[in-house]
Amino acid sequence: MKVYTSTTTTAPAARAERERTKVGIADFAVASGDATLTTSGLGSCVGIALYDREAGVAGLAHAMLPYADGDATEAKYADTVVPALVRAMVEEGAEPRRMRAKLAGGSTMFEFSSADGSIGDRNVAAAKEALSRQGIRVVAEDVGGDHGRSLELAASTGAFRVRSAHVGETTL
């Protein structure tokens, strides 16, 4: 498994049975085997889960903003984290043509929004655009609303558990 953060794009590989890896804000991680990737505190941020069931490889990103504006922090933005996540998964044996995506988050946490919509709406739209450019289909989503979410992605199956204190729990 490799973990990628907003400050580095390479991390030493580590393997472990039933490993749990926390993905922070503006981070992403790739895992395989019995590993589980988790992230919490998604409000307007968007969680992007990718998996290649045949390879048993999964990746999870926690993007804060829709589009990079010259900032080199690729994991911070939905439009730049998707290609980075795909590249990292390919390094672990996944194939883009087999990858499927699931999305969660993108809530409208505050009344403030621009003419372009809330930051949550824009994050989800940017993630979908980036996935489409990579030829990856979104097969499930739990987006929008006005509540926070915590996510858990099982690398071996692609099961994506979404939890919210206000809405409950669902598996996509």
Image (tube, rainbow, N blue to C red):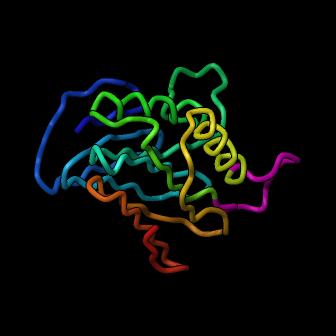
Locate residue 36 relative to residue 88 in the image: left or right.
left
**Nearer to us in this view, 4 or 127:** 127
**Nearer to us in this view, 113 or 153:** 153
Locate residue 42 relative to residue 122 in the image: left or right.
left
Query: Which span of residues is magenta-colored?
Result: 107-119
Residue 7 in the image, given as x and y percentages of width and height:
39, 26
Q: Is residue 110 magenta?
A: yes
* Residue 162 vertical position relative to residue 37 in the rendered view, above or below: below
Quadrant for the N terminus, please.
Answer: top left
Question: Which residue: 27% across, 48% down?
Answer: 56
Q: Is residue 102 magenta?
A: no
* Residue 10 vertical position relative to residue 111 in the rendered view, above or below: above
* Residue 80 vertical position relative to residue 154 in the rendered view, above or below: above
Residue 140 in the image, given as x and y percentages of width and height:
54, 61
- The image quadrant that residue 95 belongs to is top left
Question: Which residue: 45% across, 77% down?
Answer: 169
Residue 17 in the image, given as x and y percentages of width and height:
11, 53
Locate residue 145 relative to residue 166 in the image: left or right.
right
